Image (tube, coloured by chain):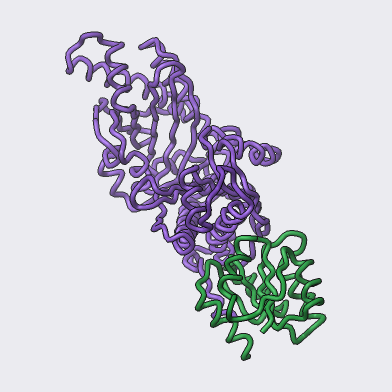
Amino acid sequence: MQIDVDSLQTYNELAREGAHSAARSLSQLTGIETRVEVTNLSLMTPSDLQYEYVGSEFSAIRIELDGALVGETVLTFDTDAGDRIAESLTPNGNEQLQRSSIEEVGNIMTSGFIDGWADHLGEVIDSSPPVFIQGSGMDVLTASAISRDEQLFVFRSRVESTAESIDFDILFVPDRTSLSSVTRPTDEGISFRKLEVFNSMTRNGAERAAENITAMTGFQTDVEINRMKFVPIEEIPVTVGDRRYVGTVMQFCGKLNGYLVILFDHPSAEAVVDALVPMETDGEWSEMEQSAIKELGNIMTSGFIDGWANVLESSIDHTPPTFVSDMGSAIMSPIVGRMAQTQDHAFVLDSTIQTDNEGTFRCEMLALPNGTELRDVLCDLLIERAEKTHVDPSEVF
Amino acid sequence: MNVLIADDSEFMRSLLREILDGEYTIVDEAENGVEAIELYNDHNPDLVMMDIVMPIRDGIEATNEITDADPGAKVIMCTSVGQEQKMKSAIQAGAQGYITKPFQKPSVIDEIESVVTG
């Protein structure tokens, strides 16, 4: 099955409009002003999606869809936000009434989210009655969605309130067969299967990068989340956020051109530097410390992109790393500015690497390939070579 | 044995110095491909440990120029790049060995001994 990039853009816009509609509904019902922060489409495994919610308790409204588009939507709030919404709708109401009010809010918001899809398709999408759930990561999706042996397309919008801390995610996970049935046939599209394979290759690359971190620093790291996002290019800085990071930026070129950004949060960067060049510092990043971070970025980048080059039987060069220390959005803005000259949506390959025991070490790897070249690369990709990501020099020399 | 290190990373040069110190004599260090060629001509070392990704001129171009001028030159690529096509380019440029970063001292010493003894 093929999907064309124009359809992905259309679906992303439908999801964004749906999120605006849902946010408006919430504002009308509760008086709480909200705004849509970001909307994107991700290709990811069910376990990666669940991992994003691990460790946080949330309230959610799940609605299953049938008809022209089969799948499920999940509206998640953190538990406190759910309580505040219920309190604003039914002050002094009993627990049953408050739960009912939350379910109805979810129902109305989800309808706003889904109606645009139905209108776009000119068909009917039926909704199940809303189901209220409270839980954590494992509970986001239904068992049937989790048990599928395939990566999921996940439309996600992040909506935040402007005054109160009532933030929520809208997830829409369409059944792939159903999504393919509404996608217009095309000869110039991207194969779903190849997108999935490329995403798996990227996970392998991230795992190799994690192994390299372990070899250099001694931290036992692993890839916790890996996903391929399709996102409006101007939203990329917002996605990365305003948290301060230290890391490297590199440009890769050859069969595939683009940028690779590695971001360590400050405690992780300090831990890395302590492991690589233990010395007293004055709080600034010395030349040797910057050099250590750059070299780690260099080695991680190779681990990441070598697999693509080997599978494609080509070479992908990368520039020496540039050291960066700034807010995430500020690091991403100049990159996005350059990419925006040729494309208005981008594929972002996003991997999170961290230590088993959370808190010691965490870094984000973001690869932003040129969209047109990625499509060409996927056309050329031989699925049977997808495992050939690693080459031992002794086999060549 | 005299060794020239060519790597743009101060950190990586210091790591290599630690590994090679006591085993071999480090005659100099280059921070890019152009410097590597100049310092090779100045010192005529027995071995060059050459990074690939460097500014101004990369390690494969520098190796090519060094081995063109001195067919007896011994060069080991010492790089994070693990791409088969790059390895083939390194062979074409005249490199005799290839080590991928991150590395441990024994693997570096083994590769050097293997290249030097032919």
Is residue A378 in view?
no
**In front of the other: A31 or A9:** A31
- Asked if residue A306 is positioned above or below residue B112 in the image, the reply reads above
**In front of the other: A121 or A386:** A386
- Asked if residue A166 is positioned above or below residue B15 in the image, the reply reads above
Count of numbered labels shown in the rendering:
0
Q: Which chain is green?
A: B
Residue A140 x %, y %: 30, 37
Q: Which chain is purple?
A: A
**In front of the other: A284 or A379:** A284
Residue A1 x %, y %: 47, 50
**In terms of image quadrants, where is residue A342?**
top right
Image position of A243 (left or right of B93): left
Residue A119 x %, y %: 46, 25
Residue under the image location 39 percent in, 38 percent down: A174
- Asked if residue A350 is positioned above or below residue A14 in the image, the reply reads below
Residue A153 x %, y %: 42, 43
- Image quarter of the C terminus of chain B: bottom right
**In front of the other: A355 or A198:** A355
**In terms of image quadrants, where is residue B94?**
bottom right
